[in-house]
Amino acid sequence: MMANLLDFDLDGLASFCEGLGEKRFRATQLFRWIHQRGVNDFGQMSDLARSLRGKLQNAASVCALPVLAQHVSADGTLKWLFDVGDGNAVECVYIPEDDRGTLCISSQAGCAVGCRFCSTGHQGFSRNLGTAEIVAQLWFAEHFLRQHFQTTDRVISNVVMMGMGEPLQNYVSLVPALRTMLDDHGYGLSRRRLTVSTSGVVPMMDRLARDCPVALAVSLHAPTDDLRDSLVPLNRKYPLEELMQACTRYLEAAPRDFITFEYCMLHQVNDQDTHARALVSLVRRYADQGLRCKFNLIPFNPFPASGLTRSEPARVQDFAAHLIDAGLVTTVRKTRGDDIDAACGQLAGDVRDRTRVEQRISLQRRSGTRNSRMAADKATQ
Ligand code: SAH
Ligand code: SF4
């Protein structure tokens, strides 16, 4: 079988090259062609020996994911729907901001955790993505956007594993993908700008701290076990006490500054002052043990099957003020890409169920350098 070279981090690629009877250092050149220059045709890799190119042509490919649809939001957010076979699709979202470009990547088709407020969770679990399928989202987005903006500069500065799926339930595929993103010969992301978001898979948080200490976001959503059990079913397996201790251990083992707690604001479910007070006392209990954290309040993106509604903006502000008054750094996430269902938790997986898949649409004119450049070119894909 042909190897898909997107499956390998640099170490893996070096072993693969060795298997072809090549020196390990050849892998660095190859890795750079693939990830830094976006080249998938071995014939174009001009500084590789002809003999190596020949071997690669017989044994390997750089195989991206077919794009089923591309959507662009009025705010410049771009979303791609990738085909991962058997009627499954995963989504990936690019969010341009003044000082950064963030890509939100999926780790699984569906998700087994089944959080009440998450549309991916409502779809159930199809399968884990392979490393190549995780990396392919970044490979495609980065090189598509560079071409699109007609730049050789890096476009994506931040990656968040906040698309579909629970990344820490797909650990084996996740780690080589993260390494490729961090590698200076790959995407060269800094560890602070690469975030894994988890609903709290405690043993894997410990492993991540050892294997690949990147920024960690923990989806908290509730200050008590009763409430969290009902929102994030994984809490029954790894309750708050264990989760908070794991967060503390993560900061000890991995030289990270803080954990980001994500908190999805659900009208009258978890958004009352009592919840804010309980949240403050929860994190204070662990502060002495070294837990440093920030809060990110996410306005809920409603979908009918959830039976839940979004907290009023004034309620979110009051809740934030409560945390800030208690000395907790708190931000409220702007919703982006609402009009194309690219907002958090709205990423849909099953193509067969999807009623809103539009065909490619042309990019709209926007203000701002990046966006006006986008408008100047048409999508080439
Ligand atoms: N499985 C991981 C990462 C993917 S979900 C996790 O749960 O952390 C990424 C973030 O989106 C999580 O914080 C999740 O709680 C949040 N989210 C999911 N559905 C949402 C919705 N409908 N509205 C707002 N945020 C949502
Ligand atoms: Fe899975 Fe995260 Fe959605 Fe929960 S919020 S169902 S863990 S993707």
Image: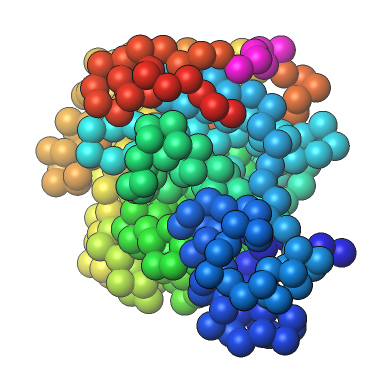
Q: Which residues are magenta?
A: 355-360
In magenta stretch: residue 358? yes
For this rendering, which residue is in front, 345 or 116?
A: 345
Please indicate whether residue 239 sits to the left or right of residue 296 in the image: right
Image coords of residue 17 (percent x, y): 67, 79
Tell me which corner region of the image, top left, top right, bottom left or bottom right, holds residue 361: top right
The kind of secondary structure the magenta stretch mainly shows is loop
Percent position of residue 357, x then y: 67, 16
* Residue 265 within the segment the image draws in magenta: no
Dividing the image into 4 quarters, which one contains the N terminus? bottom right
Instruction: Check the image and report above or below for 17 versus 95.
Output: below
306 or 161, which lies in front? 161
Q: Residue at x 25, y 16 (%)?
A: 367
Q: Is residue 244 visible?
A: no
Horizontal side of 308 relative to 351 (left or right) equals: left
Q: Position of residue 136 (x, y in %)?
A: 61, 49
Q: Residue at x 62, y 75 (%)?
A: 49
Quadrant location of the C terminus in the rendered image: top right
- The residue at 72%/18% (across/down) is 354
